[in-house]
Image (cartoon, coloured by chain):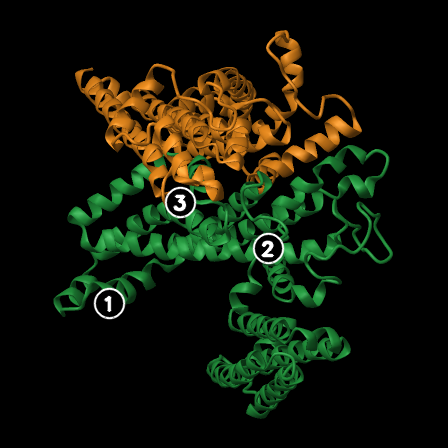
Chain colours: A orange, B green
């Protein structure tokens, strides 16, 4: 137990260190600008007075390390500065949108994870059958489709031709839970289709690689049914790689949400990020990048820790 | 029966005259092609005329080194003559774009030669792999000969907005009245070209870095490994968006950003593969002989690391291609008026709601998206086959 605590603590420390370095990169990337932020903002209309004024306002006249510390401290306290485009507080801009993005990602996760696991176990159970081949071919091609292609096909079929769901998922804070689910159904379905293939294939591969081991053969020889062997004997041991791929895909959901949000004009963080990039609103881009990167790193960290925790050899050392 | 005739055809030595005559004919064809444009742009034409001599020499050498057979020679000569025939029939188009015509000819001949060279492997390939190969070949051919195939020029406004299929505009027109087919054809050239260049650059950086880390070890390995770890900790789309905000969205910047972000994955693979090779005896021998780092990487490690790297190249290309399309779709990749599949989907996306009233109009934004999907599926099939083949050789004892 002590060993495992030590390993988890090590991973956590490493994760925090990565987070720190990433924040440094996101902050320092702006220094790549030829000249500085103030000149880049003003472009052609830069006169020495206006540049100096903007520098003072953005605190560019302070030394770099002081700016970094105050930026990081601000983010930790939830104060991310002001947007350059419309002078609003960034935390105010991001707050509701972050909740929307998380809602969409969680919704997609709740649909895709059980579905992927079931499909993967079934594919392992009926290996090399027609079902297995069809699922294999479908998932291989869905991996290679661009996200917006999947999204527009769904819009075409489910929203325009059949008219079951709205083509634009327009949500606001005062919607009820089920209304919200209904409106975000199409983006969530798109995300599900995008991530399900990878998870399902990994589940299948993890189980199949165990089927050759002696204890499975023993279980088979004992006369257990195939289902029992796979669900009770193979699945628990395949749990570590499966949990790993599930969490990595959840991390991917948070990031992959960007394109889907743009397709469905969903008011989430991804949409804000894309808008800010095209407006070159650098503080907003930095703040949203930091949030996305932090979520991604934390989820990857969780995957690491969970795969240690599910390893019985580490949990019960001799 | 058919197999035995093929075997005997493979065994007979063909006459050397067929290939010599064919090369001479092709030589004169391209010469005429470039001489025709001598008046319009002299220097390019002169460069082309010089190049065609080099090309003929290389072609002749390659051909005589090829494992020869009558059937193989017939295939190469027939395909070449077919291409020349098409060129003569549509002479005004082909002569207007001598470079594209020349490049198309090169592709046709190269493919014919490769098919003859690797016929044994190809004849055993599954139908999915053949499908993938044909799709890739078609895309590359369209991309190479884009100005010849496309009915109009890339950015020309030729009609009203959203015209229907048929007549003058085979696939209708887009939101600004530009011909959809032309945009699709030029989009192939731009999107595939940029993705290909970015992938090559990523491989150059990643493979060199990975092999160097494997060969040198110690603190070089340590530093490169940590840098890559940090770069991979940030999701690549997010990182690319951050860098594009700062550096702006020009095509060279786009290529470099994608290449650097993607080289981290190549680095991991190259390092892992290289690690297993640098401990081999022959590398030890080369080092004791006093060979430098560059020699060890190029002559000892690289040839042995080829199969996994080639398969990875296919997968990376798909990834880069999808990534680039996603960026363009978000409006942050290839900028208008350059034709590009991702931004074409974005520009015409509103049409999708008309699909009930008018199927052709509604399906329009899906055409470029489907073009992207078809290519990635094709590449994936080929990579699948290649991986299966190279790994099959190993555990097939």
Say which of A238 and B110 sits in front: B110
Label 1: few (<14), some (14–19) or many (≥20) C-alpha neighbours in 10 Å = some
Labels 3, 2: front one: 3
Q: Tell me the number on the disc at residue B268.
A: none
Q: Secondary structure at mark 2?
A: helix
Which badge, 3 or 2, comes first in the chain's sequence? 2
Q: From the top left corner, tell me how far across and down residue A78 is, in percent.
A: 38, 15
Residue wearing tag 3: B261
Q: Position of residue A290 (x, y in %)?
A: 39, 27
Q: CA distance from mark 3 to mark 2?
A: 27 Å
- Picture quarter containing residue A21? top left
Q: Residues within 10 Å of mark 2 (few under 14, many from 20)?
A: many
Residue B144 position by quadrant: bottom right
The secondary structure type at the circle numbered 1 is: helix
Disc 3 and disc 2 in contact, CB within 8 angstroms: no
Viewer-nearest of labels 1 and 3? 3
Whichever of labels 1 and 3 marks the residue nearer the N terminus, that label is: 3
Q: State left or right for residue B252 relative to residue B15.
A: left
| Same chain shared by disc 2 and disc 1 | yes
Q: Position of residue A258 (x, y in %)?
A: 53, 31
Identify the residue shown where x is 55% and y is 64%: B122
Please name the residue shown 47% across and 49% down the image. B254
In the image, residue A196 lies at what x, y percent?
54, 30
Q: Which residue is mark 1?
A: B295
Tell me which numbered mark, 2 or 1, is placed earlier along the sequence.
Answer: 2
Residue corresponding to mark 2: B132
Identify the image quadrant of residue B298.
bottom left
Residue B294 horizontal side relative to residue A160, left or right: left
Q: Image height check: is B133 above or below A247?
A: below
Position above or below: A263 against A102? below
């Amino acid at each position: 137990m002590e060993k495992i605590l030590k390993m988890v603590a090590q991973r956590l420390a490493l994760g925090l260190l990565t987070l720190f370095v990433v924040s440094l990169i996101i902050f320092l990337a702006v220094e790549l600008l030829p000249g500085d932020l103030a000149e880049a903002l003003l472009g052609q209309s830069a006169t020495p007075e206006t540049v100096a004024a903007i520098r003072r306002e953005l605190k560019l006249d302070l030394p770099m390390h002081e700016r970094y510390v105050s930026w990081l401290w601000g983010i930790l306290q939830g104060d991310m500065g002001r947007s350059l485009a419309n002078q609003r507080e960034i935390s105010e801009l991001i707050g509701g949108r972050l909740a929307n993005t998380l809602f969409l990602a969680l919704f997609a996760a709740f649909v895709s994870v059980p579905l992927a696991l079931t499909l993967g176990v079934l594919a392992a159970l009926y290996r090399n059958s027609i079902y297995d081949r069809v699922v294999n071919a479908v998932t291989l091609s869905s991996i290679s489709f661009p996200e917006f292609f999947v999204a527009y096909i769904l819009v075409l079929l489910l929203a325009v031709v059949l008219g079951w769901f709205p083509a634009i998922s327009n949500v606001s804070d005062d919607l009820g839970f089920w209304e919200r689910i209904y409106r975000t159904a199409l983006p969530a379905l798109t995300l599900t289709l995008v991530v399900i293939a990878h998870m399902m294939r990994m589940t299948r591969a993890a189980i199949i690689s165990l089927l050759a081991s002696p204890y499975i053969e023993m279980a088979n020889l004992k006369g257990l049914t195939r289902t029992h062997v796979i669900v009770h004997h193979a699945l628990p041991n395949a749990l570590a790689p499966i949990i790993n791929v599930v969490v990595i895909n959840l991390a991917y959901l948070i990031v992959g949400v960007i394109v889907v949000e743009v397709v469905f004009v969903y008011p989430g963080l991804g949409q804000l990020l894309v808008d800010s990039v095209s407006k070159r609103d650098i503080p907003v881009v930095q703040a949203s990048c930091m949030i996305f990167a932090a979520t991604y790193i934390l989820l990857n960290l969780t995957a690491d820790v969970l795969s240690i925790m599910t390893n019985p050899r580490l949990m019960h050392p001799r | 029966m058919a197999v035995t005739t093929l075997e005997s055809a493979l065994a007979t030595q063909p006459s050397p005259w067929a290939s010599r005559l064919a090369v001479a004919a092709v030589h004169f064809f391209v010469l005429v092609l470039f001489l025709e444009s001598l008046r319009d742009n002299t220097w390019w034409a002169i460069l082309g005329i010089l190049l065609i001599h080099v090309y003929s020499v290389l072609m002749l050498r390659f051909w005589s080194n090829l494992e020869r057979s009558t059937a193989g020679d017939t295939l190469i000569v027939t395909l070449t003559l077919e291409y020349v025939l098409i060129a003569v029939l549509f002479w005004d188009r082909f002569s207007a774009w001598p470079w594209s015509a020349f490049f198309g000819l090169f592709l046709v001949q190269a493919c014919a030669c490769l098919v003859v060279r690797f016929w044994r492997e190809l004849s055993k390939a599954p139908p999915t792999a053949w499908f993938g190969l044909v799709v890739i070949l078609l895309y590359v051919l369209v991309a190479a000969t884009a100005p010849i195939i496309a009915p109009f020029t890339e950015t020309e406004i030729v009609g009203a907005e959203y015209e229907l299929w048929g007549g003058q505009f085979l696939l209708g027109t887009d939101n600004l009245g530009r011909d959809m087919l032309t945009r699709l054809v030029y989009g192939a050239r731009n999107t595939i070209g940029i993705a290909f260049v970015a992938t090559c650059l990523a491989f150059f950086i990643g493979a060199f870095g990975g092999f160097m880390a494997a060969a040198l070890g110690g603190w070089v390995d340590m530093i490169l490994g940590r840098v890559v770890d940090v770069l991979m900790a940030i999701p690549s789309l997010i990182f690319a968006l951050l860098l594009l905000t700062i550096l702006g969205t020009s095509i060279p910047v786009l290529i470099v950003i994608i290449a650097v972000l993607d080289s981290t994955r190549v680095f991991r693979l190259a390092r892992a593969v290289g690690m297993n090779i640098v401990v081999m005896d022959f590398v030890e021998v080369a080092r004791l002989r006093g060979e430098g780092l560059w020699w060890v990487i190029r002559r000892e490690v690289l040839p042995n690391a080829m199969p996994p790297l080639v398969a990875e190249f296919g997968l990376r290309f798909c990834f880069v291609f999808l990534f680039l399309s996603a960026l363009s779709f978000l409006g942050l990749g290839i900028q208008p008026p350059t034709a590009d599949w991702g931004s074409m989907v974005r520009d015409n996306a509103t049409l999708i709601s008309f699909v009930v009233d008018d199927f052709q109009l509604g399906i329009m934004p899906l055409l470029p998206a489907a073009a992207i999907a078809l290519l990635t599926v094709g590449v994936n099939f080929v990579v699948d086959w290649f991986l299966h083949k190279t790994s099959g050789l190993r555990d097939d004892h």
